[in-house]
Amino acid sequence: MFFERRPTNDVIGAAGIPLLPLAAVAADKTLLPMGTPILAEVPLLDKAGNWTGKHQLRLLIALDVGGAVKKGHLDLYHGMGENAGIAAGHYKHFGRVWKLGLRNGPTATPWL
């Protein structure tokens, strides 16, 4: 994903909200509408990008979309810069995701 440089250096996702590193994800909006909070089982990687065999539960929010983000694929935003790009490139591992919110309530389909 390519982002437009802004005076504040904030990266704005498709939801129109600044993305926070390791808190915002790009998701398929047909499954996770913009603003959907999720609990994700994120794979823990070593410095070389290899999966350690462990996961960490993280609260994340769907704030962006992307061309390669279809169905169950999510892209975790790592921030700007070379190190963030390298870290993001290592995440090609599986984990589980739980959509948070109340059925038939205001959090069932945020921002629709």
Image (cartoon, rainbow, N blue to C red):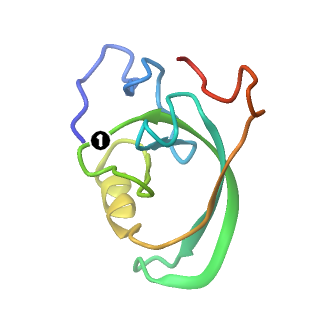
Element under label 1? Answer: loop
In front of the other: 30 or 50: 30
**In the rendered image, the vertical position of residue 110 relative to residue 89, given as above or below:** above
**Residue 106, horizontal then vertical, whole percent:** 72, 19
Q: Which residue is mark 1?
A: 66
Q: Looking at this rendering, what residue extends furthest in the front direction?
A: 104
Relative to residue 102, is residue 23 drawn left or right?
Answer: left
Amino acid type of disc 1? Gly
Extreme residue in the top direction: 7
Looking at the picture, tell me which residue is in the foreground, 81 or 109. 109
Q: Residue at x 40, y 53 (%)?
A: 71
Left or right, residue 65 beside residue 15? left
Q: Residues within 10 Å of mark 1 (few under 14, many from 20)?
A: some
Q: How many marks?
A: 1
**Residue at horizontal 41%, vertical 77%?**
49
**Residue 110 in picture, x, y percent from top left:** 60, 23
The residue depicted at 29 percent of the width and 17 percent of the height is 6
Task: Indicate whether 71 appears above or below 32.
Answer: below
Residue visible at 41% across and 67% down? Answer: 91
Residue 64 at x, y percent in the picture: 41, 34
Task: Locate the N terminus by quadrant.
Answer: top left
Percent position (x, y) of residue 89?
32, 64
- Relative side of 44 to 72, left or right: right
Left or right, 10 with respect to 66, comes to right
